[in-house]
Image (spheres, helix red, strand yellow):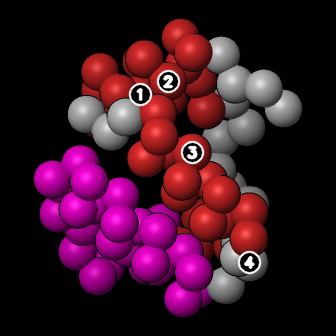
């Protein structure tokens, strides 16, 4: 799946995370297990650091549970 540069620009504008960082994280997720709490936790912490937004342990667990239970929106573009 080829992602449109407009999507990356929207994400970067909103989060201040550049395309390269996003692709590196996506690659890491692709190589890891999207259903593994440890992998997801590491990615959430990395995103938190990149964006400068703090994520509490409770929030992290909620995010992980959403992912593990397939409750993530299918159209990510609408999130931004």
Could you tell me which residue is drawn at 67 percent across and 84 percent down?
Answer: 36
Image coordinates of residue 77 in percent, x first then y, are 58, 23
Element on which disc 1 rests: helix
> What secondary structure is found at the residue carrying circle 4?
loop
- Please name the residue that numbered disc 2 is placed on: 8
Residue found 54% across the figure and 53% down from its top: 24
Q: Are marks 2 and 1 in contact (CB under 8 Å)?
A: yes
Query: For numbered disc 3, what is the local secondary structure?
Result: helix
Q: Furthest-right residue in view?
A: 1
Q: Which residue is mark 4?
A: 33
Residue 62 appears anywhere in the view: no
Q: Which badge, 2 or 4, is on the more N-terminal residue?
A: 2
First in sequence: mark 4 or mark 3? 3
Residue span colored magenta: 37-63
Q: Earlier in the sequence, mark 3 or mark 2?
A: 2
Picture coordinates of residue 51, whole percent (x, y): 23, 48
Cα separation, mark 2 vs mark 1, equals 5 Å
| Quadrant in the picture for residue 10 | top left
Residue 48 position in % (x across, y down): 27, 60
């Amino acid at each position: 799946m080829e992602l449109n540069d407009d999507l990356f620009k929207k994400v970067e504008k909103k989060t201040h995370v550049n395309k390269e960082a996003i692709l590196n994280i996506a690659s890491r997720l692709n190589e890891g297990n999207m259903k593994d709490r440890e992998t997801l936790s590491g990615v959430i912490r990395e995103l938190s650091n990149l964006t400068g937004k703090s994520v509490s342990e409770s929030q992290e667990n909620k995010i992980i549970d959403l992912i593990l239970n397939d409750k993530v929106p299918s159209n990510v573009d609408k999130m931004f």
